């Protein structure tokens, strides 16, 4: 984790900001149309030599700061151009930089899809092949290397070593007397690595860290606070609309989880930016339908009822299927009717944009999802414990994320092409889709396993893994599944490297969903059992504005 940047920021980016324009954003949604630099011509007095020496590092730290403060979406073109220049001179820069800046440059370039080599870290090892002991007392450098280690792919063995090295020494320092603000930053990083955290939630925490550091860029911090508050007002309105919409459906199913706030919180993890408002609204409604269907299959319906529901859903190509309702029991009828009405509502909205092809892909994926739900219901009814391979092949689908990916594309505009939907629905799954499904399915199982086994429920991946390997303990199974999650993250990181399979904003939705899973299922099932920690996160993003 890098420290907040000092006021000496590059002219090319800083010139787009001004306190006057920032203050004006209180009354209107922020845009990238900012006034000139608040520093005037002060930096034009620098000598050419000084500019050459300081600008690359300052630009790098400034990019890190604006992204971590949550306002990077205002400067996407500037950031891309700057990173392209840094990529071209990557090796030369790394030869000159210290470990803090090498780690920072490596992480940012990897997070933007540049396939840079991790060999640049070798120069920071001693003659025994270990990271130099002189690094252990440098907290900013340890944090920077720690965060960089989480963007690793298969073959980045040195990053596997780095995460162990930094974790060990950061925990050791936490056990001692680590002073503020490093104590808070280290504690947070050990709990939630930046690369796997929800972007908006991480930005809110980073704003707090910057407030405690006197070297922060005051104009940038003010922009981030105002931007956060304006976004929060938009998000509150969207959540209110979602809640009213859900109540208007009159879904009378006591067994279903009432989680509108949690659903919307997860949507903010997928995309929080204002230009994705329409996509967020559509995805929220469709995610609510998935949750309703999941509860119907998982917690209440009989096999006969679920087969009837599944058969009806297989005919979703025809919106005039309300006649099927007469054949259904009351509680299954409510689920099916809500599903039909929601798809009809989304269809009317997308028809205005001429993008109905996306909805057809979502319907097809819904059919596949409900078949996977039915399979698990049958296993449960028959008291059959599948092999691990049987379970996980079905679990890749039943986790809901192959559906979630195509649903998240709706409302994203022209970049969500027919080819993008076709790519996402390939069989076998693309690496990114399978990696996301793996992380979600296994993390969900590890955290919800004990609760779900208090009632009649299909065996989880934990039980299947124990049975597969004989009399091994659940603790051992957990460790083995955690290793699989780590491997899946490497797959996902690889899939996020250039050349991109589809438009990067679409791929970003997959990565951000994996981040949502990491947050929601870290030590708890934050969706099913809404803990105080989950409530605190929701409050931070949806209730508490930041004092300016």
Image (cartoon, grey):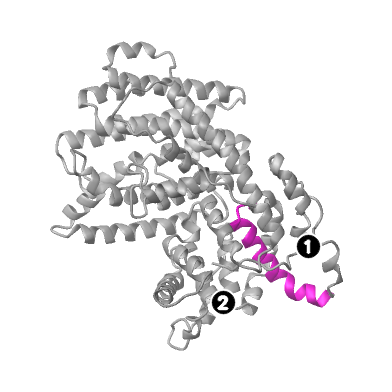
In terms of secondary structure, what is the magenta stretch mainly?
A: helix
Q: Is residue 213 magenta?
A: no
What residue did someone put label 1 on? 11
Nearer the observer, 168 or 309: 168
Nearer the observer, 476 or 178: 178
Nearer the observer, 350 or 524: 524
Q: Which residues are magenta?
A: 48-72
Q: Secondary structure at mark 2?
A: helix
In the visual, does 486 lie left or right of 53? left
In the visual, does 443 lie left or right of 249? left
Task: Specify which label sits upstream in the sequence, 1 or 2.
Answer: 1
Q: Is 488 situated above or below 338? A: below
Q: Which tag is nearer the camera, tag 1 or tag 2? A: 1
Residue 275: image quadrant is top right
Q: Is 79 situated above or below 45? A: above
Res 503 visible: no
Q: CA distance from mark 1 to mark 2?
A: 26 Å
What residue did someone put label 2 on? 99
């Amino acid at each position: 984790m890098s420290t907040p940047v000092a006021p000496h920021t590059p002219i090319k980016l800083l010139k787009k900001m001004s306190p006057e324009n920032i203050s004006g954003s209180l009354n209107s949604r922020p845009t990238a149309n900012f006034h000139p630099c608040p520093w005037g011509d002060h930096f034009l007095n620098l000598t050419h030599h000084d500019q050459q020496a300081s600008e690359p590092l300052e630009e790098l730290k400034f990019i890190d700061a604006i992204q971590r403060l949550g306002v990077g979406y205002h400067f996407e073109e500037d950031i891309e151009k700057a990173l392209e220049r840094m990529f071209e001179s990557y090796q030369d820069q790394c030869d000159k930089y210290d470990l803090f800046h090498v780690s920072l440059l490596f992480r940012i370039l990897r997070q933007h899809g540049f396939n840079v080599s991790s060999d640049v870290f070798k120069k920071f090892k001693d003659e025994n092949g270990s990271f130099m002991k002189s690094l252990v007392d440098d907290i900013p450098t340890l944090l920077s290397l720690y965060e960089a280690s989480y963007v690793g792919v298969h073959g980045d063995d040195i990053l596997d070593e780095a995460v162990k090295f930094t974790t060990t020494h950061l925990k050791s320092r936490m056990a001692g007397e680590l002073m503020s603000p490093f104590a808070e930053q280290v504690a947070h990083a050990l709990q939630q690595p930046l690369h796997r955290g929800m972007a908006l939630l991480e930005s809110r925490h980073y704003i707090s860290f910057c407030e405690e550091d006197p070297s922060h860029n005051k104009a940038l911090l003010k922009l981030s606070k105002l931007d956060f508050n304006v976004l929060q007002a938009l998000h509150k309105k969207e959540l209110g609309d979602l809640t009213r919409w859900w109540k208007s459906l009159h879904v009378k199913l006591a067994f279903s989880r009432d989680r509108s706030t949690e659903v919307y919180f997860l949507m903010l993890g997928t995309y929080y930016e204002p230009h994705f408002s329409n996509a967020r609204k559509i995805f929220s409604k469709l995610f609510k339908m998935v949750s309703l269907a999941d509860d119907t299959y998982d917690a209440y319906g009989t096999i006969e009822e679920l087969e009837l529901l599944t058969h009806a859903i297989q005919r979703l190509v025809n919106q005039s299927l309300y006649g099927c309702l007469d054949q259904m029991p009351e509680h299954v009828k409510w689920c099916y009717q809500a599903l039909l009405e929601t798809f009809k509502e989304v269809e009317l909205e997308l028809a205005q944009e001429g993008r109905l092809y996306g909805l057809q892909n979502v319907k097809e994926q819904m059919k596949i999802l409900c078949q996977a739900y039915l399979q698990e219901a049958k296993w449960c009814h028959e008291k059959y414990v599948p092999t691990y391979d049987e379970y996980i092949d079905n679990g890749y689908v039943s986790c809901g994320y192959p559906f979630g990916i195509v649903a998240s594309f709706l409302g994203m505009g022209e970049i969500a092409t027919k080819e993008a939907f076709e790519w996402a629905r390939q069989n076998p799954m693309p690496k990114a889709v399978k990696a996301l499904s793996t992380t979600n399915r296994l993390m969900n199982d590890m955290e919800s396993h004990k609760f779900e086994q208090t009632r009649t429920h299909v065996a989880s991946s934990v039980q299947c893994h124990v049975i597969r390997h004989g009399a091994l303990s659940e603790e051992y199974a957990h460790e083995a599944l955690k290793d699989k999650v780590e491997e899946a993250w490497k797959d996902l990181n690889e899939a996020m490297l250039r050349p991109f399979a589809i438009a990067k904003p679409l791929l970003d939705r997959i990565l951000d969903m994996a981040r949502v899973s990491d947050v929601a299922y870290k030590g708890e099932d934050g969706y099913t059992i809404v803990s105080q920690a989950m409530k605190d996160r929701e409050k931070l993003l949806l209730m508490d504005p930041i004092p300016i």
